[in-house]
Amino acid sequence: MRDLSGWNKFIQNCCALKDPAELQQFFELTLTAAECQKIGSRYLILSELITGDKPQRAIAADLGVSLFNITRGVNQLKQTPANVQQLIINAKNKSSL
């Protein structure tokens, strides 16, 4: 079994940062630019898949990602309870206010 203590401390630190600018600085410190890009792309993919408004090929074209990445997101969502998926919907709704 993997030791997740470092990950858990990372999450706790993220939760402690309430200012979006500080959180962005923290991510830029702890993640590479490529990691930030991948996390952002994964979020956008999941968000589009959860909303269900577009076909997978359209999502891939719009986001400039491969169908493989879309399929990975679909498979992840199949294993994710609806209440957890709702977290992305809630975050998306808050950010559009």
Image (spheres, rainbow, N blue to C red):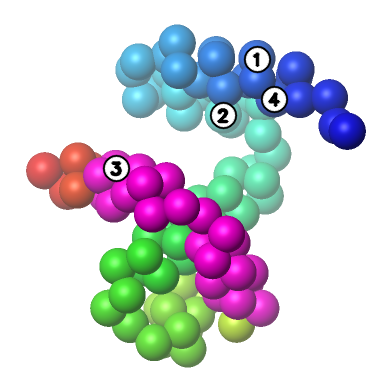
Left/right placement of residue 88 relative to residue 1 reads left
The magenta stretch spans which residues?
68-92
Element under disc 1: helix
**Between tags 2 and 1, which lies in front?**
1
Q: Identity of the amino acid at label 3? A: Ala
Residue at numbered disc 2: 27
Do labels 1 and 4 touch, CB within 8 Å? yes
Give the residue furthest to the left: 97
Q: Which residue is mark 3?
A: 91
Magenta residues, dominant SS class: helix
- Residue receiving disc 4: 7
- 2 and 4 marks in contact (CB < 8 Å): no
Query: Is label 4 in a helix, a strand or a loop?
Result: helix
Residue at 45 percent across and 10 percent down: it is 16
56 over 47 or under it: above or below? below
For the point 41% across and 70% down, the residue is: 49
Q: Quadrant of the C terminus?
A: top left
In the rendering, which numbered label is found on residue 9?
A: 1
Of 50 and 43, the residue lying toward us: 50
The residue closer to the viewer here, 47 or 19, is 47
In the displayed structure, 22 sits above or below 72; it is: above
Circle 2: element type? helix
At label 3, counting other C-alpha atoms closer than 10 Å, the crowd grade (few under 14, some 14-19, many 20 or more) is few
